């Protein structure tokens, strides 16, 4: 098979690495990809939002299967564009990707179908939102409705802060049109868990759990980022939690989407909070997590191409999804200054140290080859150094040891990825 992957981050590198293990994959392309993906796939310089060009490319090369990694093209309708051209594609259509594309939609869906989530109100009008705040309890959570690179969520401790937040989201349009609507919701406390799942429109199979570290600095300080590291499985995702989510959240979400005429085929990523009152949905995403994919996919035993095929053909019930009984930790190596301001074009040294090392992975996020053919940094998150271990502690030790195998100027990482493991 000829397979095309759309995206350019560490998640797409992890997807490409899994696809490359499939005996069915004869040739892999990635658009636009990055320097690491370029070692296992042919990168094509077409942007993820250039649907016409991607469709033309897929037809010309007779691509058998296209996998969409990123949220923006999904929410923009890339799957519909591929299907309209008669191409086989993995991911939700536009009318289903709205599960991630509109927080107001997803909150209304959860309310209508009794899926446990934080209490909330949606607002189209800043004045009404400001009036609502006058009687609200604090802290309170403000969310821009649309996609905002994971940054559209503000936790406000006081009325003053919340008023400023409403102004910046709805009036100053800090997150652009994503802030045309907003959700104001109850603040919850508890541990967060990410559960990714394969969905074929009616059947859902969840993957092993993971936990992300979204803040830039140790001790969950600093700004929100795309994710500074992950571990899998989460020791807090117990059998009891799993049973609750199976009963109230996972299938209920898939059934709700189908009942709304928005059958979901692709990946649903459940962002859960384990609150004192039980698990609640924080958010849905319509794609693999980044960097969750980097710890989940290396532990998956199935041929991923088989699973993608089963989802597309509506026979996921035939797949026995299996994960290794071990653990994995991913530590993101960023450029110092991320997520605000950072340098690009710095040479990356030591990548060869990962060659032939079983259980170790150096997933590339923001990297490219310079004119001399050297690997250089090309983004805020540069590499996702991942290692497996018999258990979480061993995986963490292995991952942190491996962070020393590579180097670039201004290399920055958190030193406490997986620290929560010690409390489990
Ligand atoms: P989201 O993009 O909706 O996952 O929100 C980003 C982050 O904001 C989450 O990972 C949580 O840490 C935090 N968050 C979102 N909603 C809430 C809430 N209702 N209560 C407390 N924290 C929240
Ligand atoms: N790591 C969180 C996300 O992919 O949205």
Image (cartoon, rainbow, N blue to C red):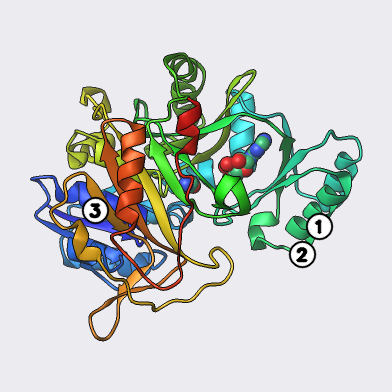
Which is nearer the N-term, disc 2 or disc 3?
3
State the CA–CA distance, disc 2 to disc 1: 6 Å
Residue 72 location (% of width, % of height)? 47, 57
Q: What residue did someone put label 2 on? A: 172
Distance (Cα) linking label 3 and label 1 = 41 Å
Question: In this rendering, does residue 198 appear at all?
Answer: no
Q: Residue at x 86, y 40 (%)?
A: 132
CB-based contact (under 8 Å), mark 2 and mark 3: no
Secondary structure of the residue carrying tag 1 is helix
Does dot 3 land on a helix, a strand or a loop? helix
Q: Respond yes or no on whether mark 2 lies under 8 Å from ligand 1.
A: no
Left or right: 344 as drawn, with respect to 205: right
Side of 44 relative to 355 (left or right): right
For the image, the number of numbered tags is 3
Q: Give the Cα separation between the discs numbered 2 and 3.
A: 39 Å
Residue 302 location, quadrant: top left
**CA neighbours of label 1 inside 10 A, class few (<14), some (14 to 19), many (20+):** some
Query: Residue 300, position in %: x, y?
Result: 24, 35
Q: Nearer the viewer, residue 6 or 215?
A: 215
| Residue underneath mark 3 | 16
Where residue 125 sits: x, y (%)?
80, 50
Residue highlighted by disc 1? 167
Quadrant for ligand 1 reads top right
* Up/down of 149 relative to 373, above or below: above
Question: Do the residues under discs 2 and 1 have CB atoms within 8 angstroms?
Answer: yes
């Amino acid at each position: 098979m000829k397979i095309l992957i759309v995206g350019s981050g560490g998640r797409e590198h992890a997807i490409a690495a899994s696809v490359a293990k499939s005996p069915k994959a004869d040739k892999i392309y990635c658009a636009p990809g990055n320097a690491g993906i370029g070692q296992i796939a042919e990168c094509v310089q077409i942007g993820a939002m250039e649907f016409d060009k991607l469709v033309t490319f897929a037809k010309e090369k007779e691509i058998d299967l296209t996998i969409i990694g990123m949220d923006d093209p999904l929410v923009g309708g890339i799957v519909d564009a591929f299907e309209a051209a008669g191409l086989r594609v993995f991911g939700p259509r536009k009318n289903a990707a709205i599960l991630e594309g509109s927080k107001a939609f997803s909150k209304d869906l959860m309310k209508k179908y009794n899926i446990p989530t934080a209490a909330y109100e949606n607002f189209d009008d800043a004045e009404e939102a400001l009036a609502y705040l006058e009687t609200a309890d604090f802290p309170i959570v403000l969310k821009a409705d649309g996609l905002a690179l994971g940054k559209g969520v503000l936790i406000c401790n006081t009325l003053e802060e919340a008023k400023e937040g409403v102004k910046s989201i709805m009036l100053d349009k800090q997150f652009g049109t994503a802030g045309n609507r907003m959700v104001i919701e109850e603040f919850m406390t508890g541990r967060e868990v990410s559960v990714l799942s394969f969905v074929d429109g009616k059947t859902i199979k969840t993957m092993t759990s993971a936990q992300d570290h979204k803040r830039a600095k140790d001790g969950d300080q600093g700004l929100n980022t795309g994710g500074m590291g992950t571990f899998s499985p989460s020791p807090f995702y117990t059998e009891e939690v799993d049973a609750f989510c199976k009963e109230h959240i996972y299938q209920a979400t898939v059934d709700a989407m189908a009942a709304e005429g928005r059958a979901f085929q692709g990946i649903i990523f459940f962002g859960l909070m384990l609150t004192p009152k039980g698990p609640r949905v924080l958010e849905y995403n319509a794609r693999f997590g980044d960097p969750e994919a980097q710890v989940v996919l290396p532990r998956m035993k199935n041929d991923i191409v088989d699973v993608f095929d089963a989802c597309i053909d509506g026979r996921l019930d035939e797949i026995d999804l299996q994960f290794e009984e071990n653990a994995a930790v991913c530590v993101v190596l960023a450029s110092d200054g991320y997520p605000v301001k950072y340098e690009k074009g710095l040479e990356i040294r030591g990548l060869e140290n990962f060659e032939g090392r079983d259980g170790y992975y150096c997933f590339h996020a923001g990297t490219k080859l310079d004119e001399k053919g050297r690997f250089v940094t090309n983004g805020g998150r540069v590499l996702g150094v991942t290692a497996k271990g018999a258990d979480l502690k061993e995986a963490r030790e292995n991952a942190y040891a491996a962070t020393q195998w590579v180097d670039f100027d201004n290399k920055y990482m958190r030193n406490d990825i997986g620290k929560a493991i010690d409390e489990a």
